[in-house]
Amino acid sequence: MFKNILVPTDGSPLSGHAIKLAVRLAKEQDARVTGFWVGPEWEANVHGETVVTGFVSPQQHAARVKKIAARYLGAVEKAAATEGVRCKVAHAVGGFPYDEIVKAARRNGCDLIVMASHGRRGISKLLLGSETSKVLAHSSVPVLVCR
Amino acid sequence: MFKHILVPTDGSPLSRRAVERAVRFAAEQKARVTGFWVGPAWEPNLYAYAEGVPAGFVSPRQHTAHVKNAAARCLAPVRKAATAAGVRCKCAYVTGGFPYVEIVSAARRYRCDLIVMASHSRGPLSRLLLGSQTSKVLAYATIPVMVCR
């Protein structure tokens, strides 16, 4: 029923859960998995948890984003490889991760998005993550939310 | 991978699409589905929010009858779709003022491992908003939830 599953990750443990579920589902469905990560945009002064705060040049920023993408998306590739699921990964930079995620789903022709209910900034178990709820609002394909 | 899928419906067209998707998915997964509908609790004066349950004064007995009718109408598509796809199906309904509470507790009670529901139902301007019940189910559920657009 699903052919291409988009798995946006932010590298958090809960995201890892979603990756596992997505890969298992993909294996069953004989689908492929597209791992996706959105990094922060370059700013003269970057504030963020994934990038060192302070001044970085655009080149340094790009290098860091690439490195972090490789680490986070490597987890997806590894999970897919152990289950023998076809896998592609991509990353983007942008200030609005949900927008990039929805666009990536469209661009890659994904027919399902599997993501965690919240990631890094999940303070409360009772709240839905901000990016997840925005993806839910804007996506035109079904979204499987893992707890 | 999934054995038992809960399909909460409010009888709206969008919800019907979620039902179809859930049943197709269940057929593939060899899972069974439980259709679920939550009606309004009886109140001396009812404000319409569930399809087929009229607003205004109704006696408790009338209310029960209305709810039963509405439940049958809302759950019929689930049963029909499941029968057509050869999926084992059960339907249930309850009344309560907080549908998401009923949905989450039904998922627990029936030991479902997935909830499939529509992103929103009625509001015409709500394309960009997540339905109130859906977002609350997402917040309170302990099992994965598939949200259909």
Image: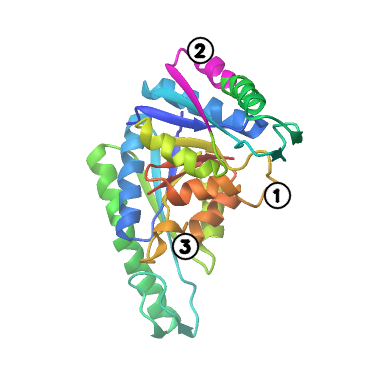
Letter of the chain that mark 2 sits on in the rendering: A
Residue shown at 49% from the left, 55% from the top:
B134
Residue A113 vertical placement versus B9 (above, below): above
User: In terms of depth relative to the viewer, which is nearer, A19 or A98?
Assistant: A98
Residue A4 vertical placement versus B96 (above, below): above
Q: In this figure, what is the number of numbered marks?
A: 3
Q: Is residue A91 magenta?
A: yes
Is any atom of residue A20 visible in this view? yes
Circle 2 sits on which residue?
Answer: A81
Q: Which residues are magenta?
A: A74-92
Q: Earlier along the polypeptide chain: callout 1 or callout 2?
A: 2
Circle 1 sits on which residue?
Answer: A124
Quarter of image, res B53:
bottom left
Tags 1 and 2 touching, CB below 8 Å: no
Q: Secondary structure at mark 2?
A: helix
Circle 3 sits on which residue?
Answer: B94
Instruction: Give the label, 2 or 3, closer to the camera.
Output: 2
At label 2, the amino acid type is: Ala
Residue shown at 49% from the left, 85% from the top:
B44
Quarter of image, res A131:
top right
Q: Residues within 10 Å of mark 3 (few under 14, many from 20)?
A: some
Tags 3 and 1 touching, CB below 8 Å: no
Q: Are the residues under badges 3 and 1 in a single subunit? A: no
At label 1, the amino acid type is: Ser
Tags 2 and 3 touching, CB below 8 Å: no
Residue shown at 46% from the left, 12% from the top:
A84
User: Residues under labels 2 and 3: Cα distance?
Assistant: 45 Å
